Amino acid sequence: MYIGQAAQRSGTTIKSIRHYESIGLLPQPRRQGNYRLYDEQSVELLIFIKCAKALGFRLKELQAIFAEHHGETMPWAQAQQAIDRKKRENRAQRAELEQQYQQLQVFEASLAQARSECPLQRL
């Protein structure tokens, strides 16, 4: 299939596909004259990249997954390791945000108390 059809089937753009090729996320496709030809495996990789980006993966992280990947199939073991790392990062961020939220509640309560005790409020 040509690049336009690969873009449509994967839900990405032609520009994104070309970019992914240029940074090594997507292997260079076969060519027929000046046209790029993509197969189902390329579409699967594009779908994986799109999903991973939607879940917060940066392109640099995806490049690390594909860095040692030279085969034609998805690097499932590396992808699982990256997912595990991302889940740990998310847990840590969630804990940090929860702590920050609690601190904001304490700060808000102290401001409310200060405002109620302020002598200028009574005027």
Image (cartoon, rainbow, N blue to C red):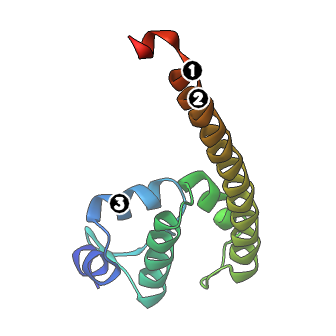
The image position of residue 42, as x and y in percent, is 45, 80
Query: Which mark, residue 109?
Result: none
- Specify the farthest residue to the bottom: 40
Which comes before the other along the chain, label 3 or label 1?
3
- Quadrant (top left/top right/bottom left/bottom right) for the N terminus: bottom left
Task: Decide if residue 28 is on the left or right side of residue 88.
Answer: left
The image position of residue 8, as x and y in percent, is 25, 79
Which residue is the site of mark 1?
Answer: 117
The image position of residue 53, as x and y in percent, is 49, 63
Q: Amino acid at mark 2?
A: Gln
Identify the residue at image location x=25%, y=67%.
Answer: 34
- Quadrant (top left/top right/bottom left/bottom right) for the C terminus: top left
Asked whether the beta carbons under mark 2 and mark 1 sit within 8 Å of each other, the answer is: yes
Q: CA distance from mark 2 to mark 1?
A: 6 Å
Asked whether 1 or 101 is in front, the reply is: 101
Label 2, secondary structure: give it: helix
Is 61 located above or below residue 65 in the figure?
A: above
Task: Mark 3: give few (<14), some (14-19) or many (20+) Cα within 10 Å.
Answer: few
Is 118 located above or below residue 94 in the figure?
A: above
Q: Amino acid at mark 1?
A: Glu
Query: Which mark, residue 113?
Result: 2
Q: CA distance from mark 2 to mark 3?
A: 54 Å
Q: Quadrant of residue 108?
A: top right
Task: Decide if residue 69 is on the left or right side of residue 7.
Answer: right
Task: Mark 2: give few (<14), some (14-19) or many (20+) Cα within 10 Å.
Answer: few
Task: Mark 1: give few (<14), some (14-19) or many (20+) Cα within 10 Å.
Answer: few
The image position of residue 56, as x and y in percent, is 54, 60
Q: CA distance from mark 3 to mark 1?
A: 59 Å
- Specify the farthest residue to the front: 122
Q: Amino acid at mark 3?
A: Ser
Which residue is the site of mark 3?
Answer: 16
Identify the residue at image location x=37%, y=81%.
Answer: 38
